[in-house]
Amino acid sequence: MKSFRKVLTFNTPHRRDYINITAQVESALKDSGITEGLCLVNAMHITASVFINDNEQGLIRDFDDWLEELAPHEPLSRYRHNGAEDNGDAHLKRQVMGREVVVAVTNGRLDFGPWEQIFYGEFDGRRPKKVLIKIIGE
Ligand code: ZN
């Protein structure tokens, strides 16, 4: 069995951002030389997510509005976690959107269903944060 590891770093310009990272994961898969196996992609921080959904800008804005309704950033006093930090909302948003995705690798490709794309969801950005790609297989 072969394994391949790569770390991506994002430093988003806004507190919340949503980035389609599918091309970067496909590039890692190509570099791995693995054609049959599994590809894990996970946020390495507890205030960011990796998730799969449609690359449609209306939907991305809907996710952001929905998350902000569920766990608004302000007032900061709403969250007991906010003392030295101001990211109580970001921890909750990450939990809803998930930590990681696993995609099957078949014939050297990410074996997606229709419209599936991989996104990095940032909820406490404007600083460098990492995403791990780990691919195992043959
Ligand atoms: Zn925190």
Image (cartoon, grey):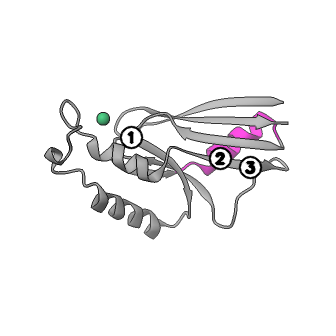
**Regarding mark 3 in the picture, which secondary structure is present there?**
strand
Residue 114 percent across, percent down from the top left: 68, 67
Inter-mark Cα distance, 1 to 2: 19 Å
Q: Which one is earlier in the sequence, the residue at label 1 or at label 3?
A: 1
Few, some or many residues within 10 Å of mark 2 (<14, 14–19, 20+): some
Residue drawn at 67 percent across, 29 percent down: 5
Image position of 1 with respect to 40: above or below? above
The residues tagged by marks 1 and 3 sit, at their Cα atoms, a distance apart of: 26 Å
Secondary structure under badge 2? strand
- Which one is nearer the viewer's eye here, 28 or 2? 2
- The residue identified by callout 3 is 104
Label annotation for residue 131:
none
- Dot label at residue 102: 2
Magenta stretch, residue numbers: 20-34
Question: For disc 1, does the CB lie below 8 Å from ligand 1?
Answer: yes
Q: What type is the residue that disc 2 sits on?
A: Val
- The reply to whether the magenta stretch includes residue 10 is no
